[in-house]
Image (spheres, rainbow, N blue to C red):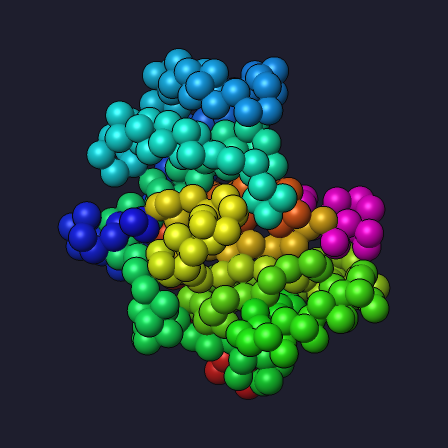
Amino acid sequence: MGIGSAREFPPHPTPAAAPASPSRPGSHFPSYRAAVADLVAEAGTLGPEDLPAAEKLVAGRLGEAEFAAVLSQCDGGADAAAERLATEIRRYRPSTRSSASDLPSLVRILLLSQIDLVWWNGTPAFESDADVMGSPDLVDLVPLRSAKLLQFQYRAQPSGLPGRARDWAQRQALPAIRPRTAGLSFTRSRPAVIAVVNQIARDLAAAIPDAPRLWVTSMVRSVQHQHRLRTLGYAAVLPSSHCVGYACDVEMAWFRRFDQRGVLARLLLERQEAGQLNVIDEGQAWHLCINPSACDELTAAYRAQSADR
C-alpha cells in the first residue's frame, strides 16, 4: 500500500486546503528527530543481523513522549505505526542495493519517514505505473528540460537492453562523469517538487559556481514500482511519500568531491529547519519530502517560472 491508498483512507483535502503540520522550529518534530538520532546511536551497538534485538529496542522506545507525539498522528495511531515499523524490521535483509546498509540506517530511515506519513496521510497514492503516466497532477520533465526550465540534472532509466548496455559502457569508460544511479523510472513530477529542487539547485550553483548542477535520482513512484524495488533488495518503504508524488531523492555521495564544505547538506537542512522539507540521510542520496503547508507557495513559483518563458 502507499500513503493514503484509496482503499484505506477517506478522501483528503487538496494540499492547498490541508492544515499546516506543526513542523516549524519549536514544534515536536525537532524533538522527534533528536530522539531518532539517540535511538539510532543505541541501535549501533547491535549485531549487523540482530533483527529481534532491533525490533525489541525500537518497540521499547516508541512509547516515549517524543515518539508518541509524531506516531500518534499516523494513520491508525501509534500502535499501527509501531506494527508497521516492526514488520519492516523483521523483513530487513542487508543488500548492496539498499540505502539501509545496516540496521541503524534502517531504523533511521523508517522513523524519519514517519514525518512524511503524518504530512500526507490520506492523500491517494499512485497505485500503478499507469496511474503515474496518466495523472493530470504530474508534469513531464522532458519538455521542461528542453525549454531550459530545469536547474537540476537527471537521467531517465533505460527501458531496454541496448540502453542498459550503453550505460554500462559509459560507466566503465568514464566512471566519475555522473552518479551511479539507475535513473528516474518516471520522468514526471508534481510542480511543487520541481520548484523546490530548482530553488535548491540555484542556491547551490550560486554557492559553488564551478560545480556540476544538482542531480535528482528519484521522483514520483507508483506503489507497484515500490514493490518492484523491494523485491530487488532496495529499502523502498511502504507507505512512501514518493507514491503520492511529493518526494524526491538528490545525489550526495558523488557530489561531495565538488562540495568539500558540505554546502548542499546545509542548504537542505536549512529548509528542514524552516519547516518546508523533511530530509532523510539515506547515504548515497538524501530523501526530501515537501510539507503540505509549503505546496501553495512552491506551486505558484513553478507557474511563475513557466509563465516567464
Secondary structure mostly seen in the magenta stretch: helix
Q: Residue furthest left?
A: 10
Residue 116 in picture, x, y percent from top left:
40, 44
**Placement of 31 over or under 287, stated as above or below:** above
Q: Residue at x 32, y 64 (%)?
A: 128
Q: Is residue 302 magenta?
A: no
Residue 207 in picture, x, y percent from top left:
76, 56
> Which residues are the magenta region?
254-269
Q: Residue at x 32, y 51 (%)?
A: 2
Q: Horizontal placement of 131 versus 237: left or right?
A: left
Q: How many marks?
A: 0
Q: Residue at x 60, y 62 (%)?
A: 182
User: Which quadrant of the structure image shows residue 155?
Assistant: bottom right
Q: Residue at x 42, y 34 (%)?
A: 91
**Placement of 133 over or under 92, stated as above or below:** below
Residue 79 in view here:
yes
In this rendered view, identify the residue nearer to me: 279 or 218: 218
Q: Is residue 266 magenta?
A: yes
In this rendered view, identify the residue nearer to me: 2 or 68: 2
Residue 127 in picture, x, y percent from top left:
30, 60
User: Which quadrant of the structure image shows residue 202?
Assistant: bottom right
Q: Horizontal placement of 168 versus 189: left or right?
A: right
Residue 23 in view here:
no
> Considering the image in quadrants, where does the C terminus appear?
bottom right
Residue 100 in picture, x, y percent from top left:
56, 38
